[in-house]
Image (spheres, helix red, strand yellow):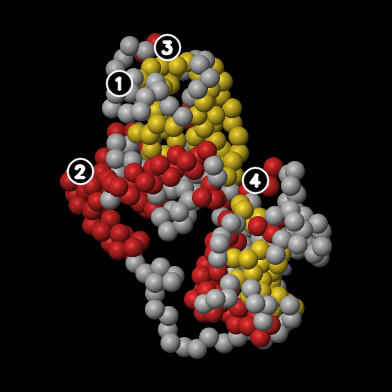
Amino acid sequence: MKSSIFIKLVFLNAVLETYACGPGMFGRRRSQKKRTALIFKEHVPNVAEFSLIASGPPVGKITRNDPTFQELVPNYSKNIIFRDEEGTGSDRFMTNRLKEKLDNLAVLVMNTYHVVKLRVTEAWDEDNIHSSNSLHYEGRAVDITTSDRDRSKYGMLGRLAIEAGFDFVYYESRSHIHCSVKKDRDNLERRSFQTIITENGTEITLTSSHLIFTKSEANLDDKKAVATYARDVKIGHFIYVVSETSSLQKARISFEKVIKVTVSRKVGIFAPLTLHGTIVVNNVVASCYAVISNHQLAHIVFLPMRILHNFKQAGLYFLQELHLLKLNSSKINPSQNRNGIHWYAKFLYKITNELVSKNFLYIDSLKM
Ligand SMILES: [Zn+2]
């Protein structure tokens, strides 16, 4: 039974590997059909911007002091010229989805015009210079030109923007193209995180459905590690903490008593996959596997992935993720991971029902 699951997984893994490594947006040979420039006042799709098949309705202005401001990411792409006439850097702030499309477009523009770059004249607006419901206030809209400000290129720039994947592209004015995107998907938005603090001041933040090794006072001498959902960790539990050392092999593990648990909402998901299925974050030993409630089982289910995956890549990815945890969720390498969950893990979330009993799953978090 187990081996048939493995064969199935290896097979599916091979199929998906092909899919995942297949030609990306810029690797694929485009059909030879000629691009047609947008005409003045044309928009694509041919519906209102707030229509659900375009960018969708406004959901509320984001101001700098608003907690939702944290959902915006700065864009420091060297392929894009930012006008930043406000001098506040506000034109660099945008949602993850807008950033992704804009970065795509910057490459398309360079491929088409070579020395000419994409130029952003407006992105997130905090000065209320747009109409009352503008998506600029949410960091979901951008006004663009080419860096040479050659207006004869703007119609084609609009066409490239459609190819880059914006949800709404509008040749709004002779002096710019306006583009906007849908709201970021739920799993890129704010999710529930637990911050666990121990008596020694060790602190770790995990998604509520992430597994962490714990012990209760009663079984402190028991050698077996118990993986518990972060959301189930309570004051008085003990967590595994690694003493400061340069090498994990020689690391000494001790138990620290949890004295405080807080819940917060943050952007992004953190679920790296490593060879041993265990990660050390801020010296705390946690499991890489979110969602599946049994660490051993999760480890077995992920076995094909661990065999087939390039370990060097995994290591780099792991380091990047650790770095990421302290910095910003926008730094995720988009080719490998768009929202912090390894594609294989994501795939498994979808097919886990076939493989393991529903009893093992934390269904609430299956929001892929
Ligand atoms: Zn605009």
Q: Earlier in the sequence, mark 4 or mark 1?
A: 4
- The correct choice, above or below, for 208 with respect to 126 in the image is above
Relative image position of residue 14 (x, y in whole percent): 25, 59
Q: Amino acid at mark 1?
A: Lys
Q: Quadrant of the N terminus?
A: top left
- The correct choice, above or below, for 91 with respect to 179 in the image is above
Q: Earlier in the sequence, mark 1 or mark 3?
A: 3
> Spatial distance from mark 2 to mark 3, Cα to Cα?
35 Å
Badge 3 density bin: few <14, some 14–19, many ≥20, Cα 10 Å: few
- The secondary structure type at the circle numbered 4 is helix
Residue corresponding to mark 1: 224
Residue corresponding to mark 2: 2
- Nearer mark to the viewer, of 4 and 2: 4
Q: Earlier in the sequence, mark 4 or mark 2?
A: 2
Quadrant of the displayed image that contains ligand 1: bottom right
> Spatial distance from mark 2 to mark 1, Cα to Cα?
24 Å
- Nearer mark to the viewer, of 2 and 1: 1
Relative image position of residue 207 (x, y in whole percent): 50, 37
Residue corresponding to mark 3: 217
Q: Amino acid at mark 2?
A: Lys
- The secondary structure type at the circle numbered 1 is loop
Return the residue nearer the eye: 200 or 59: 200
At horizontal 23% and vertical 47% (from top left) the residue drawn is: 307
At horizontal 43% and vertical 45% (from top left) the residue drawn is: 320
Q: Amino acid at mark 3?
A: Glu
Q: Is residue 152 left or right of residue 344?
A: right
Residue corresponding to mark 4: 70
